[in-house]
Image: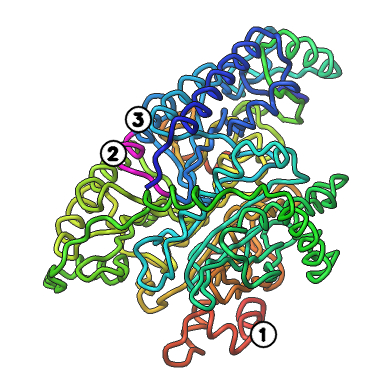
Amino acid sequence: MYLYDQYDQAMVDARVEEFRDQTRRRLEGKLSEDQFKPLRLMNGLYLQLHAYMLRVAIPYGTLNSRQMHMLADIGNKYDRGYGHFTTRQNIQYNWIKLEEAPDLLADLASVEMHAIQTSGNCIRNISSDHFAGAAADELVDPRPYAELLRQWSSFHPEFSFLPRKFKIAVIASDTDRAAMKLHDIGIQIVERDGALGAAFYVGGGMGRTPMVAPCIREFVPLDQLVPYAEACLRVYNRYGRRDNKYKARIKILVHELGKEEYARQVEEEFAHLLSQGIEPPLAELERIKPFFADPEFEFGLPTGIDRSDPDFALWVDRNAVPHKAPGYVSAVISLKPVGGIPGDASAAQMHEMAELTKQYSFDECRVTHTQNIVLPHVKIADLHALWTRLDAAGLANPNIDTIEDIIACPGLDYCSLANARSIPVAQKISQRFSANGRTAELGELKLKISGCINACGHHHAGHIGILGVDKKGVENYQLLLGGSEAQDTSLARITGPGFDEPGIVDAVETVTDVYLRERDAGERFLDTYRRIGMEPFKEALYG
Amino acid sequence: MKILTGNDLKSGAVVWWDGTGWSIYVNEAVDVGERAGEILAREQSARRVNAAYAIEASRDANGVRPAHIKDRVRALGPTVRPDLTLKPADPEVGNWVI
């Protein structure tokens, strides 16, 4: 994985000291909250319902064991013994004290981490495929390109005050595991005539106005990746709406201009940028690539699995993913225990995951946008030992991509923007389906819950989505069906009137009953919904 | 009744105006009537509280209850972590909030 050079480290260290001084001046009264708020937000420090919340960037979700140990230590030292992994491959701490935040950031910097650009109208953490470098179906590892974009976008002065926040995802396979088309810019590394390039999808997003990004250019040569991204940003920065924050995302600009006109303007700006000779040299990309070289996989490893323990066999079936190297798999650690809080991990669990990362996965793990952790390179022969350790730590939940593997935002239990609680709904649904024993029968079923229209819980992209709203001061939940954030990206539709909390759990069970009744052989819930449409589900829900 | 709430500047903890200072217990909140603006301006400029605002609430035999669910969640802590609420391991937290 990428290691900081002296410039990276100096930048992060300098920012820590700058924020230490800003915090001191705030506490001494030399800065008002109005003056200080944008400064703390630039360093990822929000004020949420119960305390300050710090969002830490995890570039493309990749961590080593030292970093994961530090995240655990921070949970113990500065928080209340836990952290929350988010839907953008980051981690959040919910109980941070302002006076301790500079020391926390210094500890993060000591392991090449920071919280810069995890808030504000700038380019946020670059996300990617959590199986990058391990997936059998990828063209190349997308992370060197994500890292190049991370370096380009970090402290980019022109893009520090965009009309709105800006999110970029990079993948390199036809299977989309990063919700690429639901980002402001989604990039897919592709091949044409033996050369690698980038397909640009621009103007996607969830939130108040969900949109699937159209492809505005199918092939950008790799040495022009940054200038093309810069052109996309420049057109947005120039014409994106600053008068209305609800219409300020790039998706609105692309929609209002039309894909063709937006693309034309980008091409014009792109041509101008190419004439300036400011694209970063390919040598920089070549410098970055070796950091992401394959680890030294062993050859001739056994590929068989002893399935005599049914619990282990079930975990392998659900949580182990094929790998490009024979004898290896990627193992997904579910942070979704039945009745638990999606994405939360205790400090003790993070320490254990760090140890397992070092022992079984070439000292590398990944945070997924589905709020789980991946050990990307695990020997099949080590799986039972790994599972035994995970089970002892309460981390062996065999439920990846099932109805119990729920994405949920923090909701009204933590978030000042939320209108309704998400976590209790997730807890009750996972308990319901664990108890009724239908999880296995339902197969792949992606359920996503947001506590407000901002859609941090990706409800638009759930096979089943749930949106919490405030109905005259009472929590109410809308049900949506038919979304996908995979390569077959689609936006879910609302079924009809919302439900109270017990009602939404019953409603989810009702729509799964319809699926089980109506499905054809081999169909997932999403496939059945697409074939039969909304009506049978509405009929069952509302009569 | 109208009560005042905000966050402690240093710790970020949720606090309630008790008539002379800021308490972490909602039951110690007092009715400020028409004095909300005056108190908020004074307290924020003195840096004793951050991001403070006035809310509607009611008082009954069980204490002070903010009118809106968001402030009831703030008053006790996340309903999904009763071990972290002001009344540790109180299984009734969720019921009180709703």
Q: Which residue is the site of mark 1?
A: A535
Q: CA distance from mark 1 to mark 2?
A: 48 Å
Q: Percent from the top left, x then y, of residue A442?
A: 42, 77
Label 3 marks a residue whose chain is: A
Taking the view exactly as shown, the residue that stands out farthest to the bottom is A520
**Mark 1 vs 2: CB contact within 8 A:** no
The question of residue A63 being in magenta is answered with yes
Q: Percent from the top left, x then y, of residue B90?
A: 44, 35
Secondary structure that dominates the magenta span: helix
Q: Is A95 positioned to the left or the right of A379 in the image? A: right
**Mark 3 vs 2: CB contact within 8 A:** no
**Nearer to me, A91 or A422:** A91
Q: Secondary structure at mark 2?
A: helix
- Nearer the N terminus, badge 3 or badge 2? 3
- Nearer the N terminus, badge 1 or badge 3? 3
- Nearer the N terminus, badge 1 or badge 2? 2
Q: Secondary structure at mark 3?
A: helix
Q: Percent from the top left, x then y, of residue B67?
A: 72, 36
- The boundaries of the magenta stretch are A62-69
